[in-house]
Image (cartoon, rainbow, N blue to C red):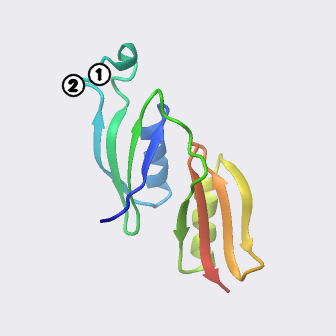
Amino acid sequence: MKTTPYLYFKGNCEAALQFYAACGLGKVVELRRYAGTPMESRDGGAWREKVLHSLFEGPHLRLYASDGSDSEPMKGCALYLELETPDAASKLFEALSAGGRVAVPFKKQFWGDHYGNFTDAHGVQWAISGGNG
């Protein structure tokens, strides 16, 4: 068994995946649209070109994602990324949090690790740590 996060978006899935690729997290490996499937007429056909299902992969990240008019924003969960160094973690934090809402600024925390968390511009919650030092 393995666990792979599945992210649900309300119409901005493709833009979110492009953003994650631009931040260096990986690339879209598979992307299927509603068009050409039995679900293409869902919501009056307004979602024809939206993402029905996708796979995003990077060296240390794998996730699935899709669009849905009935999707709920992420609640009570964050994708936690653990990087080797504070510098690498800080750079990724800055890139991914751009345009989002930072809850805990990235800095050395009282327990010794560099850590921060935020909700990105696409509504996904992230927590990033970068070792101690």
Q: What residue type is labelled 2?
A: Gly
Q: Tell me if mark 2 has few (under 14), some (14-19) or many (20+) residues whose alpha carbon lies within 10 angstroms of its own.
A: few
Q: Position of residue 117 (x, y in %)?
A: 66, 60
- Quadrant in which residue 46 is drawn: top left
Residue 57 image position (x, y, % from top left): 35, 59
Residue drawn at x 60%, y 44% is 121
Reading the image, the residue beneath label 1 is 40
In the picture, the quarter occupied by the C terminus is bottom right
34 and 18: which one is in front? 34
Most distant residue in the right direction: 110
- Residue at 29%, 42% (x, y): give it: 31
Which secondary structure lies at badge 2?
loop
Quarter of the picture containing the N terminus is bottom left
CA separation in Å, label 1 and label 2: 6 Å
In the displayed structure, 116 sits above or below 70; it is below
Q: Which of 23 and 83 is in front in this view?
A: 83
In the rendered image, the residue lying farthest to the front is 1
Read off the residue under disc 2: 36
In the rendered image, the vertical position of residue 43 relative to residue 14, given as above or below: above
Residue pictured at 58% horizontal, 43% vertical: 123
Count of labels shown? 2
Asked whether 88 or 125 is in front, the reply is 125
Question: Is disc 1 in contact with disc 2, using a CB cutoff of under 8 Å?
Answer: yes
The location of residue 51, given as percent across then percent down, is 36, 35
Mark 1, residues whose alpha carbon is within 10 Å: few (<14), some, or many (≥20)? some
Which of the numbered marks, if any, corresponds to residue 13?
A: none
- Which residue in the rendered view is the most extreme toward the bottom? 133
The amino acid marked with disc number 1 is Glu
